Image (cartoon, rainbow, N blue to C red):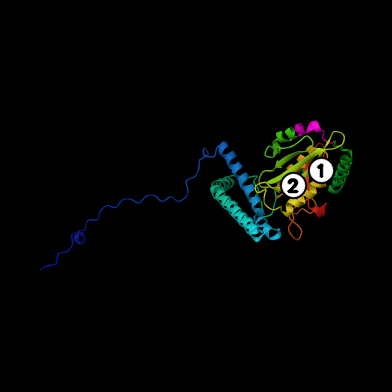
Amino acid sequence: MAHQQSPALTSSATPPVAPAPDVPTSAPSQSSEDWSEERILESLHRLDDLHNRLISLRTVIPKILAPLTTDYATPVDMFQDFSSRAVSCSEEIASFNTLYMKSQPIFEHAAASRAQNPTGIRRLGVGEMFLPEEPESGQGTKTEDVEMKDAEEEKEEEKEVVVENTKDEEIDDVVEEFSGRLMHRDVEVEELPGGTPAKRHIKVVLPPPSSLLFTIEITPSDDNSRAFVVTSVKNARHPDSPVHNIHTGILRAVAARQWPGNLEMLLEMLGSYKNIYSAKCDKCKRLTAGGKGELPVVRKLLRDGKDKRWVAYHEWCV
């Protein structure tokens, strides 16, 4: 019997093949309409949030290790606090990673924009900070002479500064004026319930990444004024957690402040702790120092003419 071949093998005709789809060589570029002013502002807000979360991550290890240097009533209490801190820190890291991945289009757009027009844009190296250029002196004055002259003028101004104690009837106005300032809109100032004319309490809550909770006790003093005593410094997100070394350091600095009878100065000082995890010591120029990596918890008010600013110091640098 003759062997019959399959028609598919014997046929010389080739079936038509559909053309392959085009393979994209790069991600579709975003048009200028996609990056409107509204989207740019939204991206800047996201980058600011990302930066704050990154600063907050500096405290992850100290938070987790804090139970090892804290006294507890029972080992169970220590384990529960340690477990709670570990879970909270893990959630912070996961949240940061998620936001970072969602922000990749912003970084890509910034890199592409810089590549197209790099004029005037300087890339910073690791550990390098952007500082505005100082104007050159046209009279050829030496820098050392200028610094000494400024220091002498600053000392003279400090001698002339007279800060009066806050009167009883001025307390509410001081709190309202402080909360209304743009730079303090994110600071919560609220009087606690249950107060009496003889004793009132105010809480001051700073936003992340510092997340500090201050309690101010207001008691009568001489000359119809009041004494303002900060009785506690805690973690605003976990107020029941054990007090950390940084909180006791801030409490010492606040207790030794100038003008203890002036509520406005106290609120300004407490508000300056918003940068507790990023402000470097004005003397040694370091963020952490000492055997345990202490932060600069002391705040001093410096005046430059009509302007004033709070600068940070380590306790041993004052």
Residue 113 visible in the displayed image: yes
Question: Is 185 on the left or on the right of 256, as rendered?
Answer: left
What SS does tag 2 mark? strand
Q: Position of residue 137 (x, y in %)?
A: 81, 43
Label 2 crowd (10 A; few <14 / some 14-19 / many >=20): some
Residue at image x 89%, y 40%? 159
Q: What range is drawn magenta here?
A: 165-174
Residue 179 versus residue 99: which sits nearer the camera? 179
Q: Position of residue 59 (x, y in %)?
A: 67, 54
Splitting the image into 4 quarters, where does residue 40 fall? top right
Residue 296 visible in the displayed image: no
Amino acid type, label 2: Ser
Q: Position of residue 115 (x, y in %)?
A: 58, 48
**Residue 232: which numbered mark, if any?**
2
Residue 120 versus residue 82: which sits nearer the camera? 82
Q: Which residue in the protein does label 1 denote? A: 302
Splitting the image into 4 quarters, where does residue 1 fall? bottom left
